[in-house]
Image: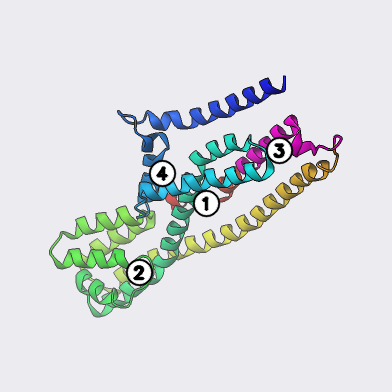
Amino acid sequence: MSLWVSYIYFFALSLVTLLLVIPNANAGKGFTLSKFLGYEQVRKEAEMVGWSLTFREFAFLVMFSVGLIGLIALFTGNYFFIALGAVLSFTLPRTIVLKVKRKIRQNVLFDLPSNLRLFISKLTDFPNVQKALENAVLDMDGVTKPIFEKASNQLRVGLPIDRVFEEMLSELKIRKMEDFLDKLRMAQMEGFHPQSLDSLKETVDEIGEDITQIQELDIEAKSKRKQLFTVIGMAWMMPVMMSFMNNGNANVFLNTLHGQIYIVSFAAATLFSIGKGDDYLSLNLDKI
């Protein structure tokens, strides 16, 4: 009977794994290992913030998750953890990439207003987008500086200003930046008078207000994450305490089949709760 329970458990986890990866594996016309592991989808997520994720880096993340769970299985003698490791190898790389992507996106948002204000200040002395940008990038810093440098170089070689602005928007992906560039384009045609500069400053101030709200929500989210981890820690106290209820010389959760299945299921539920909790508490910065 115990052997059949083991087979059923492995079959259930294997089915969950297949359901997770089959849609990605069939997304293209041909089958490849990278598609099966979900590399193509994760790579596209990383490229959205300028991270060129190689398959070697992706494979390292997969092997790290498998190796970590393998060590836990070896240390505890509970080889049901191997099934959990198989599922984790498909989900951990994407989770890490999304966290890095969110952090990079946040850095771009927080860094942008100061460089925009510097650029506007240069427009007072150089009432021309190209000249003002060339002088502004010399004093800029942060993660958005390369974007402004690229725009400056493109204008210098004669690319149309509309094309340069479109590429900036595609890299920054900030809605209010579209409003800023529209005003900048209009000011380039009509002249950089005090009213047009004030209008540009107003848009930058609006971006700054959005960032202040994001920071406030981020502080609140961190507090709720602490509450989540506190609840999870308290929930894990139950199996820890029950592990002292020995059945003869056997530890309930280490040496009995049903206990091993329970602890792996509990670990899977914990990881799922942390992942979903982080998704719910994290702001979707792609829509800013």
> Mark 4 highlights which residue?
42
- Is the C-beta separation of discs 2 and 4 under 8 Å? no
**Cα distance in 3D space between marks 4 and 1:** 19 Å
Mark toward the start of the polypeptide (4 vs 1): 4
x, y percent for residue 174: 38, 55
Dominant secondary structure (helix, strand or loop) of the stretch shown in magenta: helix
Q: Name the mark nearer the viewer: 1 or 2.
A: 1
Residue at (39%, 41%) from the top-left corner? Answer: 39
Q: Residue at x 40, y 46 (%)?
A: 45
The residue labelled by disc 3 is 263
Q: Pick the residue in front: 140 or 131.
A: 140
* Amino acid tagged 4: Val
Q: Label 1 belongs to which residue?
A: 283
Q: Identify the residue position indicated by label 2 in the image.
A: 116
Which amino acid type is marked by label 3?
A: Ile
User: Mark 2: few, some, or many residues within 10 Å (few <14, many ≥20)?
Assistant: many
Camera-near label (1 vs 3) is 3
Image location (x, y in percent) of residue 198 = 35, 70
Q: Earlier in the sequence, mark 1 or mark 2?
A: 2
